Image (spheres, rainbow, N blue to C red):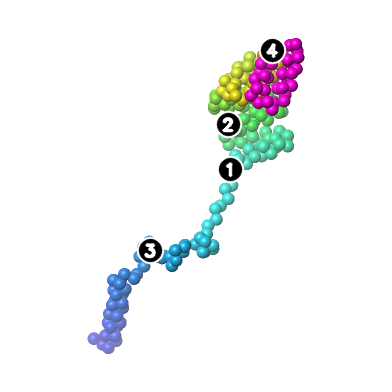
Amino acid sequence: MTTFQLLLLIIAGGVFYLFFKQLFSGNHPKRGVDFEAKVGDDQIGGINRPDKTFSTPEVEPTRMEQLLQMTDDAVEKEDFEEAKKALGSAFIIDEKNPEVLQKMGYVCMQTGEYEEAKESFEKLLLLDESDDMAHVSLANVLHKLGEDEGAEKHHERAIELDPEYAPHHFNYANTLYDQGRKKEALVGYTKAYALDDTLEEAKKMIKELGSDNE
């Protein structure tokens, strides 16, 4: 063995000695405990390392939410044609969305497109027959179309579903009044006002119809 080879052997032996000494000393880092807090409130990132915190990304509204908001904004401006355009796009996304159907029915009522409004409210009731607001909306549309038998049926169903909601009684009374059935209308206005004494129009109609019966 040459002097050079002997030197390499000594160096290799020293390296192995240091490696095994470190290995069995227990001082090497262990999985799961690489980080040890120096003080009680040390954290990885967070308060004492603001540069390591993660912000919550802002949730963008869905396309449907955007279209419904556009509809509301247009209705507020009484731009019903623009509202219909937004709702038309919403129908492409989900033609059975209850909110879209309800808003379309309302907008069509405002533009005098009663057949289209009727169609929207009928679809709404196919999705949920117990929707009292859909019943009363359909009743009002049918009355506009001169289909008073159907209107009465849906007014009565709305009242059956929510008898404590004063506007249901008021709307039914309006339909009866328009048909010349004033005594029955008076009963409806009286019931509405008893449930909600802020309905000044109901109070006015009670006074008018009451004086007619004197």
Q: Name the magenta segment's main secondary structure.
A: helix
Task: Compute the Cα span from label 3 to label 4.
Answer: 85 Å
Tell me where residue 87 sits by quadrant.
Answer: top right
Task: Compute the Cα span from label 2 to label 1.
Answer: 16 Å
Q: Is residue 202 magenta?
A: yes
Q: Which type of secondary structure does the marked residue at label 1 adopt?
A: loop
User: Relative to 76, does residue 186 appear above or below in the rendering?
Assistant: above
Q: Which residue bears the numbered disc 1?
A: 62
Quick check: marks 2 and 1 in contact, CB under 8 Å?
no
Mark 3 or mark 4: which is in front? 4
Report x, y in % for residue 196: 66, 26
Task: Compute the Cα span from label 4 to label 1.
Answer: 51 Å
Say which of 145 and 3 sits in front.
Answer: 145
Of the residues shown, which amino acid type is indicated by label 1? Thr
Q: Which residue bears the numbered disc 3?
A: 33
Q: Which residue bears the numbered disc 4?
A: 183
Mark 2 or mark 3: which is in front? 3
View extreme (left): residue = 1
Task: Compute the Cα span from label 2 to label 3.
Answer: 54 Å
Q: Which residue bears the numbered disc 2?
A: 98
